[in-house]
Image: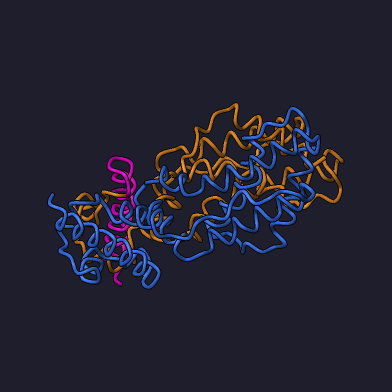
Chain colours: A orange, B blue
Amino acid sequence: MPPDAARRSERSRLAVLEAALELVVAVGYGRLTVEAVASRAGVGKQTIYRWWESKGALLFDAFVELGPVAVVGGVRRGEVVDDLTDELLAAVAEVCERRFDQVCRALVHEGRTDLVMLLLAPRRVAVEERLAVARRLGEVRRDLDLGMAVELLLGPLYQRWLLRTAPLTPDFVETLVDVALGAFR
Amino acid sequence: MPPDAARRSERSRLAVLEAALELVVAVGYGRLTVEAVASRAGVGKQTIYRWWESKGALLFDAFVELGPVAVVGGVRRGEVVDDLTDELLAAVAEVCERRFDQVCRALVHEGRTDLVMLLLAPRRVAVEERLAVARRLGEVRRDLDLGMAVELLLGPLYQRWLLRTAPLTPDFVETLVDVALGAFR
């Protein structure tokens, strides 16, 4: 591709990503159409179909490139109960953020749970890292299964989010951390 | 409605419910169309649209009326660890059963997580009842928050199912029950 065409193509690509994110926030993934994204980005519908196989794939790229950067790996200097509570409160804020929520629901909708897992992975890693430190420091059992511990902390939270079974309140997070930590000691 | 018309109408309704369940098992909810259900049931598409507002609503009615009855509330005579393991293994079998899985995914897809919760409720109640017995018998702490305990047991399991993060093996269930029970004692 000659340099000018490559620049135009890159501008179009970014315009599509931005339009997709703006629209999913405005109308929700259920009513998001490729036509509307194309029109807002000033490109043809065929351009979008050529570059992305589905709305979900487009939204995933848009979120990874332009979405808010996940807050992970803060300095850990507190008690394990406080650090885990902070981490889970951050997880709640993350999944309740409308872009993140709508992009993930679009991906679940299309059966692309592998991509949802990628978006959730940084939080999972952060929780697991804090638990690994806790295990070294003796704040939790030496033989704790870290993977299972992470699922015990984040599983109930993500279930409430995905199935909207009950509100994700700070009280819920505190009780969850308290009860789970009881199992880890 | 005269008696004959009422009988015909009820026959049509049952034919639609049966056709919907057979087709969702055969082709999956993503490719299930109202046209195909109507054709298999020998009714007009408009009849289906008149009776149900969406594929999900139709599938929910079909599952509730014709789906397998959930196995709940068996006699509890074992150790709490064994009974909870049995209950969670039954939960795994339930969500892995193709009808149940496809109907729930159709409902998640349509944002009807309230109906998914109704389908999951009997299992939740069974687990909570066993934990209530355990609390009376002193097998778990007297001040255990039963609702949170249920979420700690079922949340990780339903997360694995919905997000397909990892296989729902018997090993996973056993470790989950072991770790969670540690928190309840």
What x and y, as percent, mark residue B107? Answer: 38, 52
Residue A8 in magenta stretch: yes
Q: Residue at x 40, y 57 (%)?
A: B63
Residue that appears at 17% across and 57% down: B47
Check the picture and name the quadrant holding the C terminus of chain A. Answer: top right
Image quadrant where residue A3 sits: bottom left
Residue A64 in the image, given as x and y percentages of width and height: 45, 52
Residue A62 in sight in this render:
no
Quadrant the N terminus of chain A occupies:
bottom left
Q: Is residue B48 left or right of residue B115?
A: left
Residue A100 relative to residue B62: left or right: right
How would you classify the magenta stretch by its main secondary structure? helix
**x and y, in percent, of residue B59 in the image:** 35, 57
* Count of all numbered marks drawn on residues in the image: 0
Does the magenta-highlighted stretch encompass residue A148?
A: no
The quadrant in which residue B58 appears is bottom left
A101 in relation to B175, above or below: above
- Residue A152 visible in rendering: yes
Magenta residues span A1-29
Instruction: State left or right for residue A23 relative to residue A68.
Output: left
Name the residue nearer the viewer: B31 or B127: B127
> Measured from the top left, where is residue A96 in percent x and y?
46, 37
Question: Which residue is at 43% across, 55% downward?
Answer: B104
User: Which one is nearer the viewer's eye here, B110 or A26?
Assistant: B110
Position of residue A174 relative to residue A46, above or below, is: above
Q: Nearer the viewer, residue B179 or A115?
A: B179
Kindly give the residue lying farthest to the front in the view shown: B3
Foreground residue among A27 and B157? B157
In the image: residue A103, left or right of residue A125: left
